[in-house]
Amino acid sequence: MKLSSFLHFATFGIKTVLFRKKEPILGTIIVTDKCNLKCKHCSVNNITAVIHPYRQIKGEMKQLYDMGVRILFFCGGETFLWKDGEKTLRDLVIEAKQMGFLIVNIVTNGTFPLDLPEADLILLSLDGGRKEHNEIRGDTYDLIMENIRHATADNICFYMAINQINKHAVKDVCLTARDTKNVRSVSFNFHTPYPDTKELALTQEEKATCCREIVRMMKEGAPVFNLKSAFPYLIRNNFPTPCHQCVVMENGRLSTCGRCIDVPGLCEKCGYFFVAEYTLLFRGNVKIILEMLGTYLKYI
Ligand SMILES: C[S@@+](CC[C@H](N)C(=O)[O-])C[C@H]1O[C@@H](n2cnc3c(N)ncnc32)[C@H](O)[C@@H]1O
Ligand code: SF4
Ligand code: SF4
């Protein structure tokens, strides 16, 4: 991370903690909900299957930038399905950087060629070893590994949503992250139980077991891009929600925290690690602040 970016985030953090401000710093734009997969745990694919036009997304980028957002995620649906005429996802990333966003990340299922060197991180969903991943995501594991091998940059971070199907595969994903070329890190979430996928949620005990495994893997050198100080809160689901420093833009509609904000009762069962990490950080949790400094400087 550039020193100027670090100073911007440090100033934002200090002001937010001291004055209990609620301005956003992290924004996500949903470029489409269209997807080529239909994963068992996912409730947000192909609801409209509309690919939002370039001019609209450019406008949304500008709106987020003007609100103070400096960490931008492009998400979907499948982000690599996005195009408008000659414009591709790569053009959106380049334009976001030119607009002044300090960190620009994308989230993908990894089934398309990974030629996105301008992104700070490509969060690539890997939901286990071949068996668990394919059970959740269809027969895609080998294609994804092939795409990773041919990626044009080493900016890939695995993104695993841990649920009842893959709860025993945490170690496997950690080792694959450590040992695979072009992969820099791995980041976890627990399954967030939308009404149609409630049965995939983990119990408190299962979450605790997964966190112990992640900590063990961290000690063995696995490149985990999460904060272990947030684990006790994630296990007990007693972190503050929603995250006021995060916003999501989908088809012109701005939501605080996640597009899931309107699902009744979901925030109390939220499994997204970034929510725990950011809300605790901006409440001034000292352990989280110190760990975040080290982790972000290491992986971005
Ligand atoms: C909705 S997908 C969109 C991007 C891309 N299609 C992908 O799969 O990475 C973004 C991330 O959300 C995760 N996800 C989907 N449903 C979830 C849920 N109920 N709880 C936690 N994570 C979930 C996916 O596994 C994926 O890592
Ligand atoms: S690839 Fe992503 S958007 Fe598509 S179904 Fe799977 S999790 Fe959902
Ligand atoms: S806190 Fe609520 S709105 Fe935020 S990601 Fe979790 S479930 Fe979604």
Image: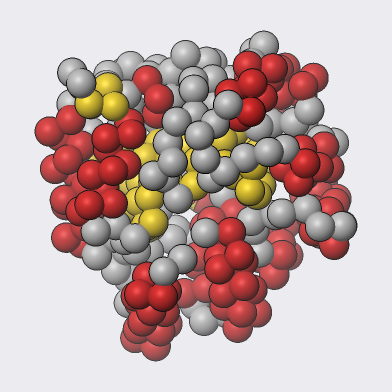
Residue 115, quarter of picture = top left
Mark count: 0
Q: Is residue 20 left or right of residue 177?
A: left
Q: Where residue 237 appears, x then y in whole percent? A: 65, 57
Q: Can residue 282 be seen in this view?
A: yes
285 up-or-down from 121: above or below? below
Residue 4, quarter of picture = bottom left
Give the residue displayed 61% in from the left and 79% down from the top: 290
201 up-or-down from 280: above or below? above
Give the residue displayed 47% in from the left and 37% down from the top: 107
Q: Where residue 1 appears, x then y in whole percent? A: 46, 66
Q: 292 or 288: which is nearer to us?
A: 292
Q: 292 or 240: which is nearer to us?
A: 292
Give the residue displayed 59% in from the left and 33% down from the top: 125
Q: Where residue 119 appears, x then y in whole percent? A: 41, 45
Q: In this view, does 31 lie to the left or right of 293?
A: left
Q: Where residue 98 appears, x then y in whole percent? A: 22, 52
Q: In this view, does 6 lie to the left or right of 161?
A: left
157 up-or-down from 15: above or below? above
122 up-or-down from 97: above or below? above
Residue 56, quarter of picture = top left
Image colouring: secondary structure
In the orientation shown, which residue stands out farthest toward the bottom?
Answer: 18
Give the residue displayed 39% in from the left and 44% down from the top: 118
Q: Is residue 198 visible?
A: no
